[in-house]
Amino acid sequence: MSVMVLDSGNSIIKAKIARRERGEVSFPHALKKLTETEYSRIISRTDISDPSLDYIRVNGQPYVVGESAERHGISTQRTGAARYTRDYYGVLAAAALGRLYDRSREVSIFGSHPPGDVKFRQDLMEAVVGDWYVEVKGKERHFRVSYANTFGEPVGGLMNVILTEDGQHYQHAGINNGRALVIDIGGFTTDWLAVNPGGEVDYSLARSVPIGIQSVIADFEDSFRANNLEVVKDTPVLPPDRVRKTITSGVFEGGGRKYHCEQEVEEATSLMLNRISDTYQRIAGGALIWDCIILTGGGSGLLYHRLLPLLNHENVILADDIESIHMANVRGGLKLWRLYEALGVK
């Protein structure tokens, strides 16, 4: 049976299937219901040769997701137990299925969650199991999700580092011989996970702390607006994708211009970095007790060079290439699924 690994992060939705080409997708975490009139108007005006993947119909209800939904101006994202429902998490999962599969099929879903949401794992599974009729680019597909399971997001990043692609062999023996700390910086939470020698997860340190990259994006927008009042007066919301790029580059591009805003980025990131530093000392005990530190999650990529002095550790490992580290958890999740299959574990 096919499997889709899903990470519904609070900034970016990521999904992966066992296929070399078009085997993974990512799109901004944004979802908005549309009326039939809105949907029909948009679809009728869309280029027939290349209709958008963002406008979909799920079980008869039209939606817009991803970048197009961000431009529509969506309401506050659901978090915690509130998001693990069929009309929210289930729809985002269906949107990912529609992007990854060209034909109807039966499929399993292996969904990740922050360690703090483990108490909601049953809700997550119930939100996706069942029948999904997904219309994308004018073509409807029927997906029957007959099985679901879950894993912790930082575990996905860990497995992407320590397991080979087939999920049945270990790589990075040096990590397996020592004690590791996994830090997963996401949209609304930063997750902390301890790993004992041999790759055994130590759940005595498995914490989710409400520190996320979304706060950096909001703080940057406040600072940028305060320093560029005339420029932004007709712009109700700065495009989140452009702000994310600015956090790493220090340059905001818009209106055909480039705005150098290193100071605004410094102000926006300093508060979050101070909170991560405090948590690093208070919960994780600082640098000396860890043989290595593994960074995963999209926030780790955005803040990587700012995190290194804070961590003060000589063996910091990225769970994937810095450009694609936001995909590390689903890539590792697929390796973990393959390990479970080899062991006959469900």
Image (cartoon, rainbow, N blue to C red):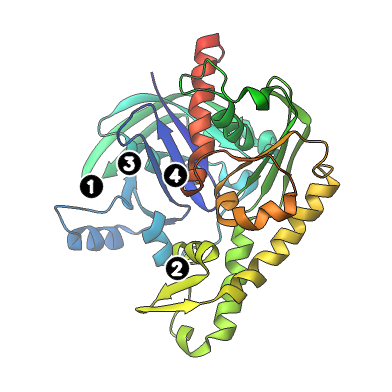
Q: Position of residue 339 (x, y in %)?
A: 53, 17
Task: Name above or below for residue 23 compared with residue 217.
Answer: above
Q: Which mark is residue 239?
A: 2
Alpha carbons under labels 1 and 3: distance apart: 10 Å
Single out the mark in the foreground, 4 or 3.
3
Q: Is residue 248 visible?
A: yes
Alpha carbons under labels 4 and 3: distance apart: 11 Å
Q: Earlier in the sequence, mark 1 or mark 3?
A: 3
CB of mark 4 within 8 Å of CB of mark 2? Answer: no
SS at circle 1: loop
**Residue that lies at the very extreme toward the bottom in this rendered image:** 230
For the residue pair 130 and 222, the one nearer the viewer reads as: 222
Q: Earlier in the sequence, mark 4 or mark 2?
A: 4
Single out the mark in the foreground, 1 or 3.
3
Q: Is residue 87 visible?
A: no
Which residue is drawn at the image coordinates 61% and 50% (left, top)? Answer: 79
Alpha carbons under labels 1 and 2: distance apart: 25 Å
Residue at the disc numbered 3? 99
**Is 240 placed left or right of 36 in the picture?**
right
